[in-house]
Image (cartoon, grey):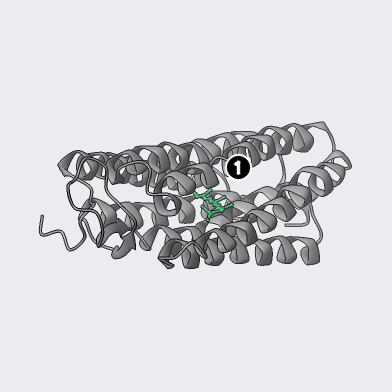
Amino acid sequence: YFPSSDINITTHGSDWYWAVTAVMAASTIAFLAMSMMVPRERRVFHYITAAITLTASIAYFTMASNLGYTPIAVEFQRNSPKVAGFTREIFYVRYIDWFVTTPLLLLDLLLTAGMPWPTILYTIFLDEVMIITGLVGALVASSYKWGYFVFAMLALMGIAYNVVLVGLAHSRALGSTVNKTFMICGVWTISLWFIYPIAWGLSEGGNIIAPDSEAVFYGILDILAKPVFGAMLLLGHRNIDPAILGL
Ligand code: RET
């Protein structure tokens, strides 16, 4: 490596990022293979889900190659005689991934619940606010970053309200198969999404854990939120005709 920040991933971090790249790529192939087992007009959820893991494959390929980051000033580094002037590797490519994939995850979920388009679009708008304020907060060097963190948290609460309360009310009206799939995938998603701000606070926010640990924390979350979520959703949709969702 030729690190241009003081606090970087090591070869362990890079190996782990390659492993996650492989998981994302393999899931993409599996979801596309599943799509070929159903008629074309029943593939909407396969295509959305495969697009999510394909996007993540490229983001993880980038981070495994130690690219897609920028050095950001942090206050200190543990175990070092140097007291000031440190920079930490911040992977902005994560947020480019999330800007594409989190709206697709919400589409997967909210289309399953048969939500009206205005609510779907407004939830995606809140999601865009969450990801962009998270990115700006990660790139800001001063403690103003926590102001952006608060904006992102407020947006996440709006998303959670729409998914859990509004979503459940709509999915219930569509019968027990839809309701069960939406319940499982919705609770899974919202529980996981509230862990992301913890990873952010320890990494981009507070510089408390090393970039290798950041890689493991976000990597596990992303595997649970994308391939595992996608598999649960597509299994649920085996018994749902998209026509009853208006698709
Ligand atoms: C940020 C910034 C701090 C506050 C909040 C955040 C939430 C991020 C979320 C990300 C979800 C990502 C997913 C990726 C797909 O695998 C941006 C970390 C609330 C919820 C699901």
Name above or below for residue 213 compared with residue 87.
above
- Is 168 displayed left or right of 184 in the figure? right
- Is 190 displayed left or right of 118 in the figure? left
Where residue 1 appears, as percent x and y from the top left, is: 10, 54
Q: Amino acid at mark 1?
A: Phe
Residue at 24% across / 50% down in the picture? 64
Residue 111 seen by the camera: no
Where residue 160 appears, as percent x and y from the top left, is: 72, 48
Residue at 19% across / 45% down in the picture? 80
Density class for disc 1 (Cα within 10 Å; few <14, some 14-19, many ≥20) is: some
Q: Which of the two residues, 108 or 221, is positioned nearer the viewer here? A: 221
Instruction: Place residue 191 in its image quadrant.
Output: top right
Where residue 51 appears, as percent x and y from the top left, is: 47, 56
Tell me the residue that label 1 is attached to. 194
Q: Quadrant of the C terminus?
A: bottom right
Where residue 196 appears, as percent x and y from the top left, is: 52, 45
How many marks the image carries: the answer is 1
Q: Which of the two residues, 162 or 174, is positioned nearer the viewer here? A: 162
SS at badge 1: loop
Residue 33 seen by the camera: yes
Q: Is mark 1 within 8 Å of ligand 1?
A: yes
Q: Which of the two residues, 3 or 144, is positioned nearer the viewer here? A: 144
Instruction: Place residue 44 in its image quadrant.
Output: bottom right
- Is 177 displayed left or right of 100 in the figure? right
Name above or below for residue 53 compared with residue 178.
below
